[in-house]
């Protein structure tokens, strides 16, 4: 506790110095509260490694289970093709799972409704998928695979049949080309293969641009949540609200100090989150490379530095709003219940901003929450213009100033500061209209 | 600063026609205090005596700037509570059952925090904290977090917190409520010690023996109004009774009949 005395200073500097003294004390107290520490710092830091570990393990487990699953495929084919088709589809076990073939010869290949009904049947003996080959190889009709997309076994059966049919088709094409003594590629003039020109690093940046802006908003809100409740409703519950009102400081300084403390907790929590994300995502997501899904994830320090001023303004906006609203509650528990739905008002626009097609422009720059998420996304992919960024900064500054005014006005009201019961929203608006506030 | 507007006398606490109303969702407008007048001089111990709900706490909260008066005026050490509440807070020490200690700070940190905000710096702050440790016997527990202290220990730290800046005015709201015999006795000793230090002490209580023992003057509050004020002898003469309990009952009877 080494706050400099604000008594001798006057004006805005004195108010600010006093606010910082209060904020320092509130942070010291906050860091000593186990619940605040866990929910604001420890949990977010541990969450990403845990989340990505679970995700990677989940992918590995799903892949393993898919390979080990036994499935059955019904085969409808002409007698000449049947054995060859069976040999092609009924392959060796895949990672322990077998694909067995059931002979389905009672149905004609053009009786589509009956074929579909067979796959859709609840009968345990019914095949998981059905492969129907055209009766005449020269027929233009194509081979069809019937499956149930809502059934995971049926999906696995479809994947295997399609993969093996493709291999079989290659074999048949090569045989035909050899018989005609021509290049096999002639029989397949368009060999279309998609190849992304993006580097794995760029793909990683794209993944982050979809994920990070939303997380920035979510973490700012979560980081401010517990301190906001603790410093307002929690203070009433601990019977220290009156003690704080006796501080020989302007009330503005006391309330600003609380907002500063909540904001600092929010910024620290967000920074720790991004750090944990950067450290864990690169390492753990790299394990997916072995499955062909790997991307190179690196924390974009340049974009983070560029978005930092906007993030700080946003943290002020969130902290002031949450602190003001939490002051309406009479106890910690009620404060949590009150802010639960409120935090969704911040998170939902951030989710909406992560949808493709929405960009930061002169219009979206004015929408709180959405603007900071879009600005961050634009900075991450290097696709943002200066004017919308400036407008975004102006909008965030105005939002933060309005939220601070709202919060200080509420906290300065003696009815809010000392109320023994949670105030309704109706009374909130009445209090905001009230002329008299304490100084 | 409004010192020029209040006559420079030895009156440290002055209240004239103090009124406080609240808006209650169920009961509508509630008049907690209905025009209280009082004056308390330096070196004097003044007791506000009254039952629960009489308006004692609300009156003391207005004097300490926690609540703003709806009407009337009050001044502490010559400073108007409505016009310069910050200066008033610098000149008072206030203690009540609702002024809890910050549980996650130690006693020493609490004293340093308040001392610093009251303008004490460096050596002066160290000296004030050390003096408080000596005066209130905090050495054995003053460096432990307040949440881990016993009720009596918390009370000692709270008193030290209230007087760390050596205020000329001390306002105490039912200071012995909830304390055991030893802690209560310590508090009474402390209040008596302030008289000799020249401090103006205004305290509320509903414990008659405390008022009889400590107070130079007593104000009887009932239904938000000051029914009578004076020395114990003056109150006895006014009501024609001997014991303070009978004085109180006679004043309440008259108020109910009026």
Image (tube, helix red, strand yellow):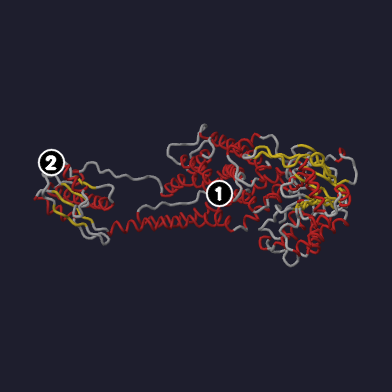
Q: CA distance from mark 2 to mark 1?
A: 68 Å
- Tell me: A45 left or right of A123: right
Mark seen at residue B109: none
Is A265 rendered above or below residue A396?
Answer: below
- How many residues crowd mark 2 within 10 Å: few (<14), some (14–19), many (20+)? few
Q: Dot 1 falls on which chain?
A: A
Give residue A408's position: percent from left, percent from top. Answer: 66, 41
Residue B111 visible here: no
Q: Which residue is mark 1?
A: A336
- Residue furthest to the left in view is A79
Rendered position, A112 above or below B143: above
Image coordinates for residue A407, horizontal then vertical, percent: 63, 41
| Residues at marks 2 and 1 touching, judged by CB atoms closer than 8 Å | no
Residue A139: assigned label: 2
Chain at tag 2: A
Direction from residue A145 to residue A215 in the image, left or right:
right
Q: Secondary structure at mark 2?
A: loop
On the rendered structure, is B231 left or right of B21? right
| The N terminus of chain A: image quadrant | bottom right
Figure quadrant of residue A67: bottom left
On the question of residue A415 being in view, the answer is yes
- Which is more foreground, mark 2 or mark 1? 1
């Amino acid at each position: 506790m080494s706050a400099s005395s604000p008594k001798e200073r006057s004006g805005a500097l004195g108010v600010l110095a006093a606010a910082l003294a209060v904020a320092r004390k509130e942070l010291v107290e906050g860091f000593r509260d186990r619940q605040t520490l866990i929910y604001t710092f420890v949990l977010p830091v541990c969450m990403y490694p845990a989340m990505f570990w679970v995700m990677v393990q989940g992918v590995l487990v799903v892949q393993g289970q898919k390979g080990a699953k036994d499935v059955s495929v019904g085969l409808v084919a002409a007698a000449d093709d049947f054995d060859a088709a069976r040999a092609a589809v009924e392959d060796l076990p895949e990672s322990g799972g077998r694909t067995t073939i059931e002979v389905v010869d009672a149905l004609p290949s053009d009786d589509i409704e009956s074929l579909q009904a067979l796959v859709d049947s609840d009968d345990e003996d019914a095949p998981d998928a059905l492969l129907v080959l055209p009766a005449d190889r020269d027929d233009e009709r194509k081979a069809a695979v019937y499956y149930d997309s809502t059934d995971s076994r049926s999906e696995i059966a479809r994947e295997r049949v399609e993969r093996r049919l493709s291999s079989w088709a290659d074999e048949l094409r090569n045989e035909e080309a050899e018989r005609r003594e021509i290049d096999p590629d002639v029989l397949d003039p368009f060999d279309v293969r998609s190849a992304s020109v993006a580097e794995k690093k760029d793909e990683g940046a794209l993944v982050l641009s979809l994920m990070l802006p939303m997380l920035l908003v979510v973490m700012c809100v979560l980081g401010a949540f517990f301190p906001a409740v603790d410093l307002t409703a929690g203070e009433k519950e601990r019977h220290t609200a009156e003690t704080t009102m006796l501080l020989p400081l302007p009330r503005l300084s006391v309330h600003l100090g609380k907002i500063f403390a909540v904001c600092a907790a929010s910024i620290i929590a967000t920074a720790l989150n991004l750090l944990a994300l950067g450290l864990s995502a690169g390492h753990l997501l790299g394990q997916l490379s072995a499955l062909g899904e790997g991307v190179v994830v690196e924390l974009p320090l340049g974009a983070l530095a560029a978005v930092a001023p906007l993030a700080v303004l946003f943290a002020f906006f969130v902290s002031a709003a949450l602190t003001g609203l939490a002051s309406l509650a009479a106890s910690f528990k009620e404060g949590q219940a009150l802010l639960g739905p409120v935090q969704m008002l911040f998170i939902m626009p951030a989710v909406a901003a992560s949808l493709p097609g929405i960009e930061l422009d002169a219009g979206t720059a004015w929408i709180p929450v959405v603007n900071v998420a879009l600005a961050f996304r634009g900075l991450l992919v290097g696709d943002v213009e200066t004017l919308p960024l400036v407008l975004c900064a102006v909008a965030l500054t105005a939002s933060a100033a309005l939220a601070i005014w709202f919060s200080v006005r509420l906290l300065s009201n003696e009815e809010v500061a000392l109320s023994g019961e949670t105030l309704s929203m109706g009374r909130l608006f009445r209090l905001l209209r009230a002329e008299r506030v304490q100084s | 600063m409004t010192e020029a507007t209040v006559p420079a006398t030895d009156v440290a606490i002055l209240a004239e026609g103090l009124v406080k109303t609240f808006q209650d969702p169920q009961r509508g407008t509630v008049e907690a205090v209905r025009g209280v007048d009082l004056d308390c001089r330096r070196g004097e111990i003044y007791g506000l005596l009254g039952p629960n709900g009489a308006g004692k706490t609300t009156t003391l909260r207005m004097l300490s700037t926690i609540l703003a008066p709806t009407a009337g005026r009050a001044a502490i050490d010559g400073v108007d509570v409505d016009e310069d509440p910050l200066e008033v807070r610098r000149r008072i020490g206030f203690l009540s059952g609702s002024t809890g200690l910050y549980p996650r700070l130690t006693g020493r940190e609490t004293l340093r925090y308040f001392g610093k905000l009251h303008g004490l710096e460096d050596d002066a702050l160290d000296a004030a904290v050390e003096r408080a440790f000596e005066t209130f016997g905090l050495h054995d527990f003053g460096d432990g977090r307040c949440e881990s202290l016993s009720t009596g220990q918390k009370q000692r730290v709270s008193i030290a917190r209230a007087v760390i800046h050596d205020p000329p005015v001390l306002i105490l709201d039912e200071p012995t409520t909830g304390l055991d015999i030893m802690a209560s006795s310590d508090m009474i000793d402390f209040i008596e010690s302030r008289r000799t230090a020249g401090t103006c002490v205004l305290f509320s209580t509903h414990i008659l023996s405390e008022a009889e023992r400590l107070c130079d003057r007593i104000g009887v509050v009932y239904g938000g109004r000051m029914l009578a004020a004076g020395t114990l002898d003056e109150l006895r003469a006014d009501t024609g009774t001997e014991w303070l309990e009978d004085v109180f009952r006679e004043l309440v009877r008259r108020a109910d009949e009026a």
